[in-house]
Amino acid sequence: MIEHGFKIDHEKCRGKLACMRACPTGAIRVKEGKAEVLSDLCIDCGSCLRVCPSGAISPTTRSLKEVKDFKYKVAVPSAIIFGHFPMGVTPAHVIDGLKSLGFDSVYAYVVEVALANRAIRDYVENWKGRYPLISSNCPVIVKLIQVSYPGMIEQLIPIYPPREIAGREVKQRFSEKLGIPKDEIGAIYITSCQAKTISILESAEGVKSNLDGAIGISDLYNGILTATFQKQKKDNDQKLLSKDLLHGMEMLQWSLSKGQRTNLQGYRYMSLTGLSNVIQVFDDIEKGKLRNIEFLECYACWAGCINGNLTVDNFYVTRTKLHRLMAELPENDPWVESEVKRRYAKENCYAKADIKPRHLRSDMVDIKERIAQIKQAEDILAALPGLNCGLCGAPDCRTLAADIALGISQKTDCVFFSKDRLEKLRRIHLNNKG
Amino acid sequence: MAEELFKKVFTVHGGNFDRAGESSTEIKDKLKDLNIDANLVRRAVVIAFEAEMNVVMYANVGTMNFIITDEEICLEISDEGPGIADIEQAMQEGFSTASDEMREMGFGFGMGLPNIKKNSDFLKIESDVGKGTRVFARIRLNTDD
């Protein structure tokens, strides 16, 4: 069973079908008035989480309480958090806020972004295989390729995202400094989406993450703001400048959807966001189109991670704030450069294992039987109404037909063929309405 | 004799650039649904797409037969078009008769037929100048024998 970045609370689920209709891979069924996920098909995009009207779907992030078990707790925040607060709240306030919520230390992965950038540049430069190369920063894109475009797996760049390099560094550094074992140091990622959470709990390449879980920005937002306001009333001490904490603009740049453009200047580069756009372009690539693009930076969320489902502000607002913050920072910073020089030669930035295709239907029947199933599904589809109403509990008639051929649904799930189905739905959805 | 398991016929219209590639997308979805090895799917899709584009760019109309047997994926494309005078020359990488306009659009780099050849295990091309071209491409399903 594959773990996913969210859980559905069946107590709260009212079977309103919103998640089923929003799912881009058709992975949700609502047969008995409760949503169920077909685990193999789910790519953790979180579309269902956004649309649930009953609040029944929640991300598998950690709570602050769980994190307290670690002897020493280090927050590793995504740069997006710095673009999330009102004007007067600086990165220094955010870091203080995180500490007041129970973190012993906050680690801004400035150098790790520069390390990852450097590793990506070297990888692209030495690449002899098929183009375009594809960034692996967005875990949903990685899973989409594993599930739907297995032929493109070799085009995924196998470089760790900065958060993973940072997790390793945090454990190493604080364990040396404090003289306690690495596993007593909790490296907690502060994330903009639930997909990164699951990439930590169960990575695509199947090896243990360097981080110990993630907490959503939205879970900490109120706490940070409250702490900042209380503190501002008490003291007016000199805060550290953004420049002292973030050094150059590289970390903030990374968090934006065109984060690699500056890093890969001179290469034929394309950035795209939004799962439907990514799917369209991947389809073209599979046909052999777009041969002239060398590097693709893709994100499942529209506008990229700033629009992740655990963010708070509208992404235009976040982007504007990040741009304003970037304007205060130099493009490059000599300290970051010297750190990269020191660490790049001795640190391995490559992921520990290869990403493999995720095979659907492991109980796959042989090709003849499958063709018979497909033909049967086509015949069934021809008999269905084609209204895609979803009342059968599948997202559309085509999916119901395929499910019937596979033996996991019946034709009587369709309200056009069964009064019982309609009666059942009436009981579930109208029971309190006279 | 190989047993035919599945067959679908697509019509491809010349000059229909906006819808070009739809048949190859359908072929891809079908092959994926059959859990056929990703590499074979990729090869078949490249063949289908290049062949489809050749019809769209040069011919009036064509048909593409997509057949799956227990041994092979077969793609047979026949068109009513200008035909190819010198097939050997057309098979060379970079040789192209595409117009400047087509090249500006990113088509016609002279890689169509060479790409089809590169991705098929068996290829036969027949052509009558002024009448049309027939392309027969096959990919073996079982790569071990």
Image (cartoon, rainbow, N blue to C red):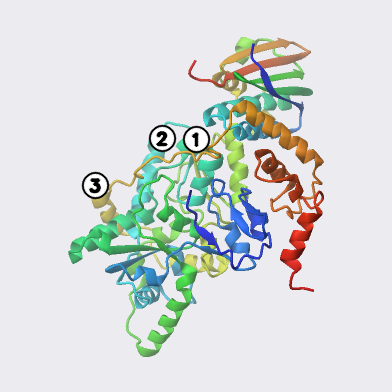
Decide: is B32 above or below A62: above
Residue at mark 1: chain: A
Q: Is residue B108 visible?
A: no
Q: Position of residue A145 (x, y in %)?
A: 52, 42
Identify the mark at residue A107; answer none if there is no mark: none
Instruction: Please tell me how crowded label 1 is: few (under 14), some (14-19), or many (20+) other residues with Cα within 10 Å.
Output: many
Residue at mark 2: chain: A
Give me the residue at 52% from left, 60% from top. Answer: A7
Residue at mark 3: chain: A
Q: Is residue A309 left or right of residue A372?
A: left
Q: Is residue A111 visible?
A: yes
Decide: is A168 above or below A245: above
Residue placed under numbered mark 2 in the picture? A127
Q: Position of residue B44 (x, y in %)?
A: 60, 26
Q: CA distance from mark 1 to mark 3?
A: 29 Å
Amino acid of disc 1: Tyr
Give me the residue at 33% from left, 47% from top. Answer: A349
Q: CA distance from mark 3 to mark 2?
A: 21 Å
Identify the mark at residue A131; answer none if there is no mark: 1
Q: Are marks 2 and 1 on the same chain?
A: yes
Q: Position of residue A255 (x, y in %)?
A: 46, 58
Decide which of B55, B123 is in the foreground and name it.
B123
Decide which of A390, A211 is in the foreground and name it.
A390
Tell me the SS state at disc 1.
Answer: loop
Amino acid of disc 2: Trp
